[in-house]
Image (tube, coloured by chain):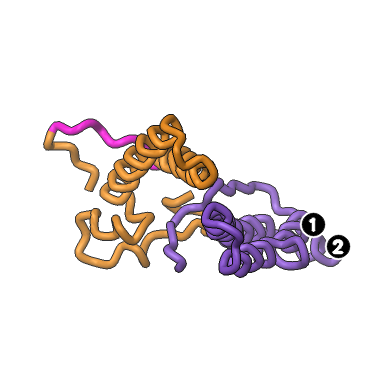
Amino acid sequence: MSGNSNGMQTCPSKEELMKKINEHSFAVDDLLLYLDTHPDCEKGLQCYRENVKKRKEALKLYAKNYGPLTIDTADECASKSWEWVLQPWPWENKGGCR
Amino acid sequence: MWNYEKRLQYPVNIKTPNAKVAQYIMSQYGGPDGEINASLRYLSQRFTAANRVCMGVLNDIGTEASEMIPGTFPARKLFLTNIRAEDILCL
């Protein structure tokens, strides 16, 4: 699944990629609250755009290589079955999404 | 509406079981100052908010508070994983 025969950059490890997703998601969550009360802040808007873009890319890459984390990326992995329900959940001790 | 993301807002990584902490985490979930209470309060107040900014903030912090609920459960579960009966009995 994680073959990179098309010359794209190698995929980061599961932990690295999850860390990246968590960081950008945290930034987006926080920027959302900030922008609610500062809707005209150009710097805030720019920061929001950048983080949303990076979050989306990371979620897509994660889904492709390690299984989906969001319903929007549930079909990214090259699998014929419904990976969403087969992949581990965050409360499981061993799993892909922790 | 609820749209689940298969990850926690903050990673929960617990190696040592601790029934007391699990009990404490449970209190953050329910009770007068728990996340269920907070989220439902914000999400109810937003309907009669004084202005649009207030309405938006209540909606978004209510959402944020309800996100804490799926976070407290795995934390509690992991604090209780491999726990011994005597650890629970002496609470």
In the displayed structure, would residue A57 be above or below residue B70? above
Marks 2 and 1: CB-CB under 8 Å?
yes
- Tell me what residue is drawn at x 24 percent, y 67 percent: A81
Res A15 visible: no
Q: Main secondary structure of the magenta part?
A: loop
Res A32 visible: yes
Q: Find residue A34 and name its label.
A: none
Percent x, y for residue B71?
A: 59, 56
In the displayed structure, would residue B71 be above or below residue A7? below
Q: Find residue B91 and name its label.
A: 2
Which is more toward the observer, B23 or B16?
A: B23
Q: Amino acid at mark 2?
A: Leu
In the rendered image, residue A22 lying in the magenta stretch gets the answer: no
Which chain is displayed in orange in the rendered image? A
Q: Quadrant of residue A3?
A: top left
Q: Quadrant of the C terminus of chain B?
A: bottom right
- Chain identifier of the residue bearing label 2 in the image: B
SS category of the residue bearing label 1: helix
Q: Find residue B20 and name its label.
A: 1
Which chain is displayed in purple in the rendered image? B
Residue most extreme to the right:
B90
Bounds of the magenta segment: A7-14
Q: Quadrant of the N terminus of chain B?
A: bottom left
In the displayed structure, would residue B66 be above or below residue A58? below
- Tell me what residue is drawn at x 47 percent, y 38 percent: A23
Q: CA distance from mark 2 to mark 1?
A: 7 Å
SS category of the residue bearing label 2: loop
